[in-house]
Image (spheres, grey):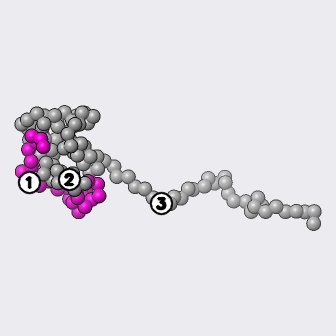
Amino acid sequence: MSEFRSGSKRFYDDRKFPKGFSKSGCFTLNEAELLSLYGDTMLSLENGSLSPENADEKHFLKVLKNPSKASSAIEHLWLKYTKLARGRRNFHTLNSYKKSPANDAVNDEDDYIVDEAI
């Protein structure tokens, strides 16, 4: 795989993914396993509490500054996780209510044609 160190403990995010990564519907089973194994290391590298020991970890820090340089599956996965966990969650509704302007009041006279010739 890569030279990335696995974390000292399994990585969980109970605040954003309370049922786990695999049951969230956002990650594949493989991605959920990778995130659980390497997430603690990636979070520590991002926070600065862990210093990089090899080329992969140094490249990961460069990717955090410039996401377009992501090349490995782990780097893409971390970017996906941060987007989902820290980004704004979209909300879509099936119906909407459009408030009509005050000057578009319904006029009953416009709805009926009156034939005065009768």
Q: Is residue 57 above or below residue 91?
A: above
Q: Residue furthest right?
A: 117
Dot 3, crowdedness within 10 Å: few (<14), some or many (≥20)? few
Q: Which region is colored magenta?
A: 1-27
Relative side of 27 to 109, left or right = left
Task: Quickly name the residue at label 3.
Answer: 94
Residue in view at x 20 percent, y 53 percent: 30
User: What amino acid does circle 1 point to?
Assistant: Lys
Q: Is residue 9 visible?
A: yes
Disc 2 is placed on an element classified as: helix
Residue in view at x 51 percent, y 58 percent: 96
Relative side of 84 to 62, left or right = right
Nearer the observer, 30 or 118: 30
| Cα gap from disc 1 to disc 2, whole angstroms | 18 Å
**Viewport quadrant of the N terminus:** top left
In the rendering, at what x and y percent does residue 9 appear?
8, 54
Q: Are marks 1 and 2 in contact (CB under 8 Å)?
A: no
Relative side of 37 to 100, left or right = left
| Cα gap from disc 2 to disc 3, whole angstroms | 32 Å
Task: Quickly name the residue at label 1.
Answer: 9
Q: Are marks 2 and 3 in contact (CB under 8 Å)?
A: no
Nearer the observer, 76 or 11: 76
Q: Earlier in the sequence, mark 2 or mark 3?
A: 2
Q: Is residue 55 above or below residue 76?
A: above
Q: Quadrant of residue 78?
A: top left
Disc 3 is placed on an element classified as: loop
Residue in view at x 69 percent, y 59 percent: 106
**Viewport quadrant of the C terminus:** bottom right
